[in-house]
Image (tube, helix red, strand yellow):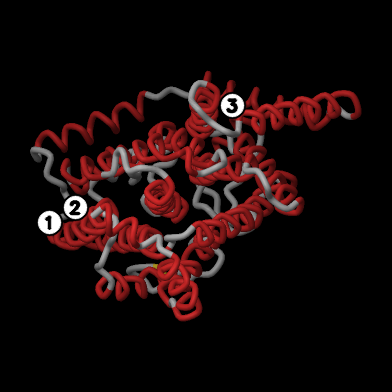
Amino acid sequence: MVREYLAQTGPEIVLENRRKMQLDWGFILTILAVASTFLGNSLVRLDLGIFTLYPLRLLGFMGVFYMLINQKWDDPFLSFTSKFIFFMMILGFISIFWAPDTVLAIKEFGVLQTGLTLTWLLTKYINTEKRVELVLLIWVLGAILVNMIGLWEVVNQKFLIVEKMGGKLEREIERIGALAPRSIFVNQNNYAFFNAITAPVLLGMFVKKTRPLWHYLVTGFSLALSVYLLISSYSRAAMGGFALALIFFAVFTFFTKSNHKISVLKLLGIAAIAIALIVAVNTSLLDVITNKLDMVVEKNNQRTDESRADIYAENLALVANNLGIGMGPGSSYDKVDNLPPHNFFLQILVEYGLVTVLGFLWIFYRVFKRYGLYKQVMPDALPYILRASILAFPLMSIGPSSIVGEGIFWLWFGFIIAYSSIMLRKYCSVLPPKEID
């Protein structure tokens, strides 16, 4: 397997892949799916009753065809991931028949299928550093689009895309004294998760060396927007997860062998100078950010987590009663609020079973391990920040009621898998294969 892996990095294969680039419809479909992630399911949509059709879902349906005809993998880990995705799709479809609410189960399975297909497309067709750069550029520009909508909502204190506001959200606004933006998402917690998972990726790109000036400016602008809108969303889980990712990133950067320490120190220096200039020239922006952080603290002091604990206890009781066997899509929804349990792994555990959760954890573990073993072959900070975001993900994911329907999660999940495989292949081509999985 190692010889085959090394062989695929030969110049003949590289040239052949370049010649086929224009005819690679699977890659084109993948790029369109990545771009449609930043349109969400509210900007462009068609309500068909039992399910809603939007760009990412349409492309997800088309992607199933490519999944059925492309099953050759050079990386054993990607092969395992592909089989796991198929297993989860089949399990999700079959479990519709024993789910407590069939209509809800069909809707939830459609959402799951869309996300799993996006992940599969990324692991299959994002297989070179050049393609990674294209995905990241789309991510930067897509984040600007999403966050410009959010910025408009912060400034005008009203929603741009969806005007409907539930009673719970109205009480939230009355309590914290400001409207938290939601942009293209169903609520502010899902929007906060978007920025919590996006900001580390943007930071990893910004720290990278040898980029054109325009790239630094655009990425820096997107990063600043993402962090500001993250704070404006008042989500404790999202902000805490992002902060935790930064802490782990600092640990991995300064306490392991890395070649971007100077870049990070320069970035910290620039940030310190920028803050000092803001304070010296105009303190209003700093006051705005400080006030928003104060609101987060106030929100934390006023809110109790008893209801969240009750939901967790109820779902764990369901798992115990069913011996870890999934109860079907939608079965984790709370009977009172009609919402999932605000925990990704708990939702998967209740709806799809213990085996599926273990599969996710195994994939996260292998990706995390690969980033640790092969990070030296990538001369930038992205492997370090992605590794840190894996550790922070459990905290990030408990803010929204569910992230299964969020394309940004499946984009991030598929990207970290695909990028880890590219790192392994590059490692094999430049260094002796000490630890090949």
Q: Which element is circle 1 on? A: helix
Position of 114 compared to 254: left or right?
left
**Where does residue 416 sit, x and y in percent of width and height?**
42, 48
Nearer the N terminus, badge 2 or badge 3?
3
In the image, residue 359 above or below residue 277: below
**Where does residue 197 sit, x and y in percent of width and height?**
50, 42
**Marks 2,1: beta carbons within 8 A:** yes
Q: Which element is circle 3 on? A: helix
Of the 4 image quadrants, the one containing the N terminus is bottom left
Position of 336 compared to 30: left or right?
left
Q: Which residue is mark 2?
A: 328
- Regarding residue 48, the answer to whether it shows in the image is yes
**Front residue (pair 14, 194):** 14
Q: Residue at left 84%, top 29%?
A: 278
Residue type at mark 1 is Trp
- Regarding residue 347, the answer to whether it shows in the image is no
In the image, residue 375 above or below residue 250: below
Q: Residue at left 47%, top 72%?
A: 15
Q: Which residue is mark 3?
A: 296
Graded by Cα atoms within 10 Å as few (under 14), some (14 to 19) or many (20 or more), the crowding at tag 2 reads many
Residue type at mark 3 is Val
In the image, residue 133 above or below residue 424: below
Residue 98 is marked as 1
Q: Residue at left 32%, top 73%?
A: 66
Graded by Cα atoms within 10 Å as few (under 14), some (14 to 19) or many (20 or more), the crowding at tag 1 reads some
Residue type at mark 2 is Gly
CA distance separating discs 2 and 1: 6 Å
